Image: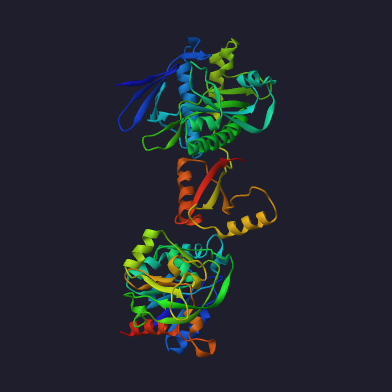
Amino acid sequence: MRIGITKFPGTNNELDIKRVLGSLGVKNELIYPDDVKKMDEMDALILAGGFSYGDYLRPGIIAVQTPIIENLQDYSNSERFVIGICNGFQMLCETSLLPGVLSTNTSTKFISKWVHIKTGITSSPLLKGMENRILKIPIAHFEGRYYDKDEEITKLANKNQIAFKYCRKDGDISLKENPNGSVVNIAGIVNRKGNVLGMMPHPERASFQYLGSEDGRIIFENLIGELKC
Amino acid sequence: MLVVYSGKAKDVTLLEDNKVRITFRDSISAFDGVKIEDLKEKGKINCRTSTILFELLNRYGFATHYLSNLNETEMICRKVEIRPVEIVCRNVTAGSFCKRYGVDKGIEFETPIIEFFLKDDVLHDPLVAKEIAIQLGWVTKEESALMESTTRAVNQVLSVIFERISLKLVDFKLEFGRTDGGELLIADEISADTMRLWEKETGEIKDKDRYRKDLGGVIEHYKDILQRLEEIESHPEIPIKSTAEITIELKKSVLDPAGEVTLRSLQRKGYQGVEEVRIGKSAKISFSLTPSPNLQEIIKEISDSILSNPLIENYTFDFSSGE
């Protein structure tokens, strides 16, 4: 079993993800923008966050023009798992593998802090056993405000595609605990099939007790559990 | 077969497959048809001149209605609906321009001038402002941008070509037509009837002004232009450039935090009456390509798929051509 982690100029989270996967005993490889062949050999793919191509034009949009992301539609159609974290989530929205867009935080500030998110009820194997679970997890982004038209948000909710919402420590979901202005506090979503997950918070930065939380580790454990099946 | 249009110097016959046959007659007219007569061989000369110039424009990547030459006086073209506005490009002052503004003939413009005229003999083809033509629906904004940029690029090409045969391209007019599919093409004819050409060394008039001003020798001079065009053996590299300027704005319904912050700052500074600030982006893309409907489509595709996110942003673009 091998998991690929994408590396674009300007991304900076791939080594954190590598460390988590390594600690779980899973082989993993960095996948560079032209490495379509290697990408296709991977059993799952994680799009690491950061600032691909300097976030020029719009976060993720330049990365989306590269061979590996152009190949992502076919890759995900083959039922393999794809997780996009932060800048990776922005890429997934720009490719239309996930609906919506991540726009500038309402505060117009770059936000880097610990938040709490509540797991939704989805059919995604990546979130198995996590229903309603509250995770303590950091965010670090400038464009993290999830936006889509009202009718699309309703569809997401009806189809059980809302993976995470920002919440209070006790799990209460209120606008007050919404750090960036996301529509209905959305912090992450999954596609209809449940094999593509996009999220703004960083589970790889909450995967060891010494980092202050290991709540994010379960997402990687779930992924590996699925691949072993 | 059906003659769909009979003009002052040409007939247009409808053929199958959205094609037309254009027949050049020997008649010549001026002053909106007030002065009119037949000049032997004129149809033949203008058909040949138009054929050469359209083939030249096609070779340089322009979208024109010309398909092929049929015989001495006829050519086969794509069927188009002629737009009611024609474009004049001027390198040097002459003709109606001098009369309208009371200026001398022969003043060279630093940047060629583009003018829009309404095609209407009864009104004597009046000059129209682009904004009027757009608002009255004679052309769309997109068409006007393409017409203007295409005309500038045609000027660039024709000026070089005529320079090669020692002629000065003073001004010319282009007509445009729209195909059933909505493609905007250079149409009508391009000949000594539709442009002013002066002998480079002496300034001698070689074009239709000879007829308008009763200078005589119309056919001889038309023939001379044609002969020189026929003698051109190779075609020079002409660096045609097209530029698109795309402005991207957040949709009205989408919150613009940067705009809000700027608004508050302006209000705090005490600027009166500042109501709203929206911050957008703009991109300027230069192409080493001839302006064409196809290029306009490519720019739209780039704007839709990369430069803007249609979910939250709108864009507008302007299109131009220049050296």
Identify the colour scheme used: rainbow
User: Can you tell which quarter of the image residue A173 is in?
Assistant: bottom left
Residue placed most toward the observer, A191 or A153? A153
Residue A146 % position (x, y): 46, 65
Q: Is residue B50 visible?
A: yes
For residue B272, above or below residue A225 = above
Residue B196 % position (x, y): 59, 22
Quarter placement of the N terminus of chain B: top left
For residue A203, above or below residue B196 = below
Residue A151 % position (x, y): 36, 59
Quarter placement of the C terminus of chain B: top right
Residue A172 in the figure: left or right of residue A155? right
The residue located at (53%, 61%) in the rendering is A58
The residue located at (44%, 64%) in the rendering is A93
Residue placed most toward the observer, B210 or A44? A44
The residue located at (55%, 15%) in the rendering is B220
Residue placed most toward the observer, B30 or B266? B266
Residue B65 % position (x, y): 42, 32
For residue A167, above or below residue B123 = below
Residue placed most toward the observer, B239 or B280? B280
Q: Is residue A42 visible?
A: no
